[in-house]
Image (cartoon, rainbow, N blue to C red):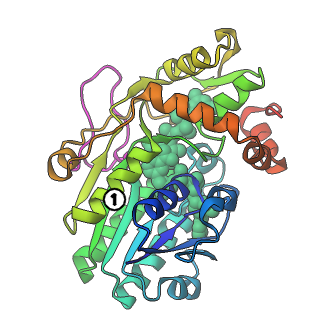
Amino acid sequence: MKILVTGGAGFIGSNFILYWLKRHPEDEVVNLDVLTYAGNLLNLKEVENQQNYRFVKGDITDTAAVTEAMRGVETVVHFAAESHVDRSILEPAAFVKTNVLGTQVLLDAALKLGVKRFHHISTDEVFGSLELGSDQKFNEETPYRPCSPYSASKAGSDMLVRAYAHTYGLPVTISNCSNNYGPFQFPEKLIPLMLMNALADQPLPVYGDGLNVRDWIYVEDHCRAIELILAAGRIGETYCVGGHSEMANIDVVKELLKTLGKPERLIRFVKDRPGHDRRYAIDDQKIRDELGYRPAHTFEEGLRATIDWYRENEEWVRQVMDKEYQQYYQQQYGEKGPV
Ligand code: NAD
Ligand code: DAU
């Protein structure tokens, strides 16, 4: 089978390509990625010379580039997106362009070229925010209530995917997953950012009161869920995917410091994110019952593996924490980032 992965040089996309090629060496993978600040070909060094892997530099909003990359492809797995909520608050336009328009360009090409499966990677953030302390969880029936420019653009992309299925009969599946962490995650997101700061003995900037809750999934478990959906997911269906590790941000940060043997006095409470969603939680009974999904990693195991990976990959860390990163850090946090 020939698969087109979009955004395969990013965090989850690159983990997915490495995972897929290990488990399906008979398949051919084409990786279409424009290489924004978040895309990094170092992530794919292990497979870059393999016959069954090909990288194509291109933008998903460019019809010609997309059509060329999708030729002969049976399955599309669509990760490419602007993915960071804080950046979407600073500059929303790129999120609408890539996440909404880019998805529509891909859907059009998939329809024209007769792709057999279009799998769209989405997020639990499209459902909005849950009450702290309630036992509510998101599931496939939860109405969409996106609250940030990022989640609104992802919700728009999900709606387009559903519309192409309903109107034109495009064979699609969608997954809405919770917060991923693991190797190759750009250090703008909570876990790698706090890890980099802690290793440099710099303050750890916790937004607001630190009580916002997220459900954490080790990235390999997300890859496994996508594999299960591609193998046996029902066409036209949505699957919610969770990590079964709901935690307040402050507890994530404390666990990280404990694992590293660093003091809690490094924690600094800072101004809250505007419109900060309070709590996300996933009820993933559908994918558990239909496809036998279970996350294989506890948060403690996943965190330890993540810390080990960042410690062992200093070159990767040095490369991504470049001038652009320092500028972003200064703009977002009003001070210099760790060097
Ligand atoms: P990421 O920011 O690490 O990677 C995004 C990748 O997309 C990068 O390689 C980037 O170069 C590429 N890209 C961006 N714009 C592009 C364009 N116009 N054309 C081609 N390529 C482009 O993101 P991630 O964290 O790996 O997330 C991947 C997907 O998973 C996204 O769709 C995101 O919404 C979704 N998701 C992420 C999480 C999470 O916790 N990170 C959770 C659920 C869902
Ligand atoms: O839920 C899935 C989503 O998870 C994905 O769709 C997004 O692509 C991904 O970025 C992530 O969104 P979050 O906003 O939840 O992730 P982030 O790592 O940015 O923040 C996690 C929590 O930590 C959130 O409550 C904000 C808080 N936070 C984050 C940063 C970067 C801080 O307190 N301080 C920080 O410096």
Q: Is most of the magenta stretch helix, strand or loop? A: loop
- Say few, some or many: other residues with alpha carbon within 10 Å of mark 1 (under 14 / 14 to 19 / 20 or more): some
The answer to whether residue 133 is magenta is yes
Q: Disc 1 marks which residue? A: 227
Pick the residue in front: 55 or 273.
55
Pick the residue in front: 239 or 228.
228
Position in image of residue 82 (x %, y %): 57, 57
Q: Does dot 1 land on a helix, a strand or a loop?
A: helix
The answer to whether residue 11 is magenta is no
Report if residue 212 is visible in the image.
no
From the viewer's perspective, is 328 left or right of 122? right
Determine the image quadrant of residue 130.
Answer: top left
Please give the name of the residue rendered at 36% of the width and 51% of the height, measured from the top-left corner: 224
From the viewer's perspective, is 21 left or right of 244? right
In the rendered image, the vertical position of residue 236 relative to residue 39, given as above or below? below
In the rendered image, the vertical position of residue 17 relative to residue 275, given as above or below? below
Determine the image quadrant of residue 53.
Answer: bottom right
Question: Which quadrant: the N terminus?
Answer: bottom left
Please give the name of the residue rendered at 61% of the width and 43% of the height, measured from the top-left corner: 86
In the rendered image, the vertical position of residue 69 relative to residue 77, given as above or below? below
Please give the name of the residue rendered at 45% of the width and 66% of the height, measured from the top-left corner: 78
Question: Which quadrant: the C terminus?
Answer: top right
From the viewer's perspective, is 330 left or right of 174? right
Classify the position of ligand 1 by quadrant: top left, top right, bottom left or bottom right. Answer: bottom right
- In the rendered structure, which segment of residues is drawn in magenta? 124-145
Position in image of residue 62 (x %, y %): 58, 81
From the viewer's perspective, is 331 left or right of 214? right
Name the kind of residue labelled 1 in the image. Glu
Position in image of residue 137 (x %, y %): 26, 35
